[in-house]
Structures are given as structure tokens and as C-alpha cells.
Image (spheres, rainbow, N blue to C red):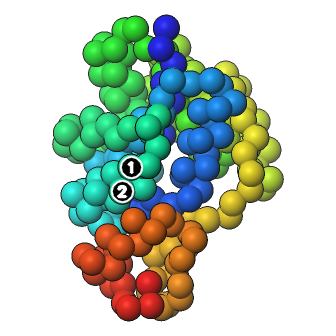
Amino acid sequence: MKKVGLLGGTFDPPHIGHLVIAEEVYHQLNLDEVWFIPSNEPPHKNKANTAVKDRVAMVEAAIANNDHFLLHTIEIERSGKSYTFDTIQLLTQKHPEISFYFIIGADMVEYLPNWNRIDELVHMVIFVGVKRPEYELTTNYPIHTIDVPGLDISSTMIRDRIAQHKPITYFIPSSVRRLIKENNLYGSSERT
């Protein structure tokens, strides 16, 4: 069976932490591809700060130079909240020849008991928990854990740095930085 990693998120904006996680999981689990799935409306967060079209364009730019990273817009095409159960159900129906690995951060591992239809979901997909030093990664659910280099970068931190007119060079791919600047996303300025 083909093995595909799924990395979902708002990607508001995508940053090098996302790319490092995807690449590490790809190599450590010997995956065929990693699909980046921007959420339409995440159930556990407020709405995204940036329009869907801009977030999709940023993900496309971020992964453009990696032939085993692909963009999948399944959650954007489906309006409303982006529940993982619905996404996995559709993907497994559409691609029965693929074994899916759902990549989540350590913070989400601790939140798993609150996920929509988690008891069914764990039988549909292999969860991959990405270890971070500040989280224990303990759960009663079956999780395959992966160690990745520690990068304390978040989309929130990048948006905050832009708002404070601090540089974001090296935190995000230069192609994403250009899109942020060209489209004046997050109130960016010339220093971005």
C-alpha cells in the first residue's frame, strides 16, 4: 500500500517548523508523500486570520520545491468546520489503496480525548505524534511517536513579529515571505 502522511492546519502562515516536521516524518516512516491540508474552519481555534485563497497560495509556495510534498484542498472544498473524522472518512473512501498517517503535534496528542469521533478515527488512520520537550505525549490512544529537531516557531509568533515590525527572515520560506509582503498580509511592512 502507498503510505501518505497528512499534515493539517490553518497554515496562517506556513513556516519552517511545518516543513521540518513533514520532512522528518516522511523520512522516519518511509512515506511516499506528505499531503498538506489547509483547514477551512478549524474546530479548536477561532477563524483563520487570513483568507483561504491566501493560505492556499502560501502553502503552495512553501512546498513548491519538494516533490514529495503535495497540497490537498479537501477541507477547503467542504465548507464549515474541518473535522478530522470527516476528512479521513472522505480520503479513505476515495483512496482505499493508501494507508494514511495523520501527523499531529504533542499539544494535539494531549487534546485527543476531545476530538470529534476519536474512538472511530483511531481505527481509520495511524496517528503520528511529533514529540516536543514541553509535552509528555501520554495518551490512551494508539500513537506512533516521532522525534523531530526542536524548532520553537509558530504561526502566531510569526504574525506577532510582523505586527511588531520584527524580521521574519528564516522563520518562513522566502517564497512565503514574498507573498505576505506582496499581498500585505498580517499588516506587513517593508521590514518583513
Task: Determine the residue positioned at 52% across, 78% down.
Answer: 168
Q: Is residue 40 above or below residue 30?
A: below
Task: Determine the residue positioned at 72% across, 35% down.
Answer: 146
Is 47 left or right of 125, judged from the image as shown? left
Residue type indicated by callout 2: Ala
**Quarter of the image holding residue 144?**
top right
* Mark number, residue 64: 1
Is 22 left or right of 33, judged from the image as shown? right
Q: How far apart are marks 2 and 1 (CA)?
A: 5 Å
* Disc 1 residue crowd, few under 14, some 14–19, many 20+, Cα 10 Å: some
Numbered disc 1: secondary structure: loop
Task: Determine the residue positioned at 51% across, 66% down.
Answer: 172
* Mark number, residue 187: none
For the question of whether residue 11 can be seen, the reply is: yes
Task: Residue 151 in the image: state x and y as whole percent.
Answer: 69, 60
Viewer-proximal residue among 68 and 125: 68
Task: Residue 104 in the image: state x and y as whole percent.
Answer: 57, 40
Residue type indicated by callout 1: Ala
Please state the total of marks drawn on the protein image: 2
Q: Do the residues labelled 2 and 1 touch (CB within 8 Å)?
A: yes
For the question of whether residue 143 can be seen, the reply is: no
**Quarter of the image holding residue 61?**
bottom left
* Disc 2 residue crowd, few under 14, some 14–19, many 20+, Cα 10 Å: some
Task: Residue 97 in the image: state x and y as whole percent.
Answer: 40, 8
Task: Determine the residue positioned at 46% across, 75% down.
Answer: 159
The image quadrant where one finds the C terminus is bottom left
Viewer-proximal residue among 53 and 191: 191
Q: Is residue 124 above or below residue 187?
A: above
The residue under label 2 is 61
Q: Is residue 44 above or below residue 116?
A: below
